[in-house]
Amino acid sequence: MRGVVMYAPGDFRVEDRPQPAILKPTDAVISLTATCVCGSDLWPYRGAEPIDGPSPIGHEYVGVVEEIGDDVTTVKPGQFVVGGFSASDNTCENCRAGYQTSCVQREWMNAMGAQAERLRVPLADGTLVAVPGAPEEDLIPSLLTASDVLGTGWFAAAAAQASPGKTVAVVGDGAVGLMGVLAAKQLGAQRVIAMSRHNSRQKLALDFGATDIVTERGDEGVEKIMELTNGLGAHSVIEAVGTQESMLQAIHSTRPGGHVGYVGVSHDVTLKGDELFFSHVHLHGGPAPVRQYLPQLINLILSRQIDPGKVFDLTLPLEQAPEAYRAMDERRAIKVLLRP
Amino acid sequence: MRGVVMYAPGDFRVEDRPQPAILKPTDAVISLTATCVCGSDLWPYRGAEPIDGPSPIGHEYVGVVEEIGDDVTTVKPGQFVVGGFSASDNTCENCRAGYQTSCVQREWMNAMGAQAERLRVPLADGTLVAVPGAPEEDLIPSLLTASDVLGTGWFAAAAAQASPGKTVAVVGDGAVGLMGVLAAKQLGAQRVIAMSRHNSRQKLALDFGATDIVTERGDEGVEKIMELTNGLGAHSVIEAVGTQESMLQAIHSTRPGGHVGYVGVSHDVTLKGDELFFSHVHLHGGPAPVRQYLPQLINLILSRQIDPGKVFDLTLPLEQAPEAYRAMDERRAIKVLLRP
């Protein structure tokens, strides 16, 4: 089958890869209807994360179950499924606490390589959620977002405790930040401030429920948030970038007692203890346990209460994955959907 | 009047200081019944924090109101009062959110110097809580703990979300850590693991409600917590030291989705973003808004449901404050009460 293989920064190819097969009785193999490129895939693409030999990549997926192992009971061949970007048993104590990305049996889907025609999914019972019936074609992009960016934005908004009456600021106007705007709105936030300098992203943010746009970043961005919040800072801040600047921008934009939900994969971030101490903020984040939110998000999508699929502003055949990476790297596209 | 004055690390003296007076109509002046030395006072004593010229010190106090400014309405001369270690108006948005130590008008009481015979308290209406009637003599040490260490331990336990059914670990066996044990127990924790290598502190921890003692520290301490928690880590961890080692010990002892409540004043602590990210913990702490808890804590003390005053294992006259510092510095005493 065809799939994306990383060779070196900037050198990601579409090649023939071995057909995935059932390796354990808890596995499923699915035929992918759609997959996509994640902002976090750009870290190795840009050389900011090591690449370990030619290796597959991709962790966002929706598709149809082809085959299941003997122990799989909750999904069956022919069903359309959405799964989280990490495999989880959904039964261990961490999963039951809602932290499926810290499942004691966790496996990262990146290692399986979801940018491909077919995919082996470990721990299928705990990882996959079947969509009732066959979803309408136009809902497929939205269902695909549930696999990572929507669930990640949702977790960020939940970790930031976005809720009615609150002012939420969102640092980062990538797909996850935009999904954070959507989630904050859905969670009832009174005011959602999107921090973005890009026209197309600002428009999408407003579409997803932002009430204010702040174009400044760093300390100037913080100042602007202070102006908008009576000098106190936002109640809730979503951090969706993962750099030192964005993390400090998020912490400094939060009022004492407020909450920072951070989901940008941290790269070279160091936080000073005394600064955190006197900020009085709550800090929570990490790899989003999207599995926790899948049933709820699938319902919202199927009932057309949300339309997160709009975050895809480019669709390409899988064979053109290298162009998808280039478009996202050069910020010509917010997020690219790939059709195997 | 007599009061402690810092000259240099290790050189803290009891001297004549000017009588405090009402400077603003919101001030009160109180005559101190008891004061004490805080673990955080040891930072400048040990040279780990700069000392700005000869300056007063001390921020824990109980006493009798002598004089009030024209705008003070909630306390009056003759009343026995307890106050927080920072002055707060208790009306601003941060105070109303429960973060009185981030009051927009905050003043640190250390600058007023509570290790003295008398004390000026700014924002008296927001800072002081009157105790009904004259407290029994044997309750005075406990009431004094409410001014800082008890309230700080309580905030740490609340920030760590100690509650029924949970396992709480406490890093630090100083007065605040011990108060954290007491608070966790009061908040209903099922299991409270005190990390302590000192016999007398272990005994006190057990007295305050600890169910387990771990004598190891650092990575070995973390390993021990893992052994005691089925390899997952504690639900809630209180950090009551403020060093790099103690902070990492706390974070590493917490399970994914668990909560770290940190109240040790951070000194030279830096946290790596990626380590925090993948730990999945909640982090909250800072200078404890003890004012929030004062009414509740005073009630628990007056009704003799808790006896936090036991944390004082040495009582000296104010004149012997230098010996109080030495005893705490050399860990001969857990906490020293000073009688002006």
Image (cartoon, coloured by chain):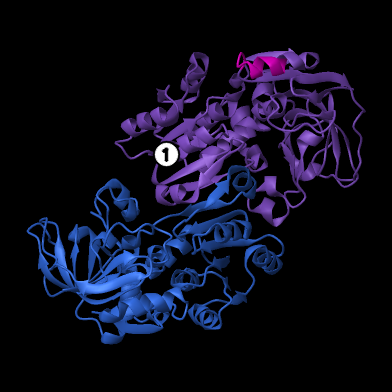
Chain colours: A purple, B blue
User: Which quarter shows the N terminus of chain B?
Assistant: bottom left
Tell me if residue A146 is in the magenta stretch.
no
- What segment carries the magenta color? A324-333
Residue B105 appears in view: yes
User: Which quarter shows the C terminus of chain B?
Assistant: bottom left
Which residue does the image show at 67% across and 62% down from the upper left? Answer: B219
Nearest the camera: A90 or A318? A318
Task: Tell me the element at label 1.
Answer: helix
Which residue does the image show at 68% across and 45% down from the upper left? Answer: A101
Q: Which residue, given by chain and number where applicable, does mark 1 sit on?
A: A252
Compared to residue B325, the image places residue A113 above or below, namely: above
Which residue does the image show at 41% across and 83% down from the upper left? Answer: B313
Magenta region, main secondary structure:
helix
Instruction: Residue A135 in the image: state x and y as whole percent.
Output: 71, 25
Q: Is residue B338 left or right of residue B29?
A: right
Tell me if residue A329 is in the magenta stretch.
yes
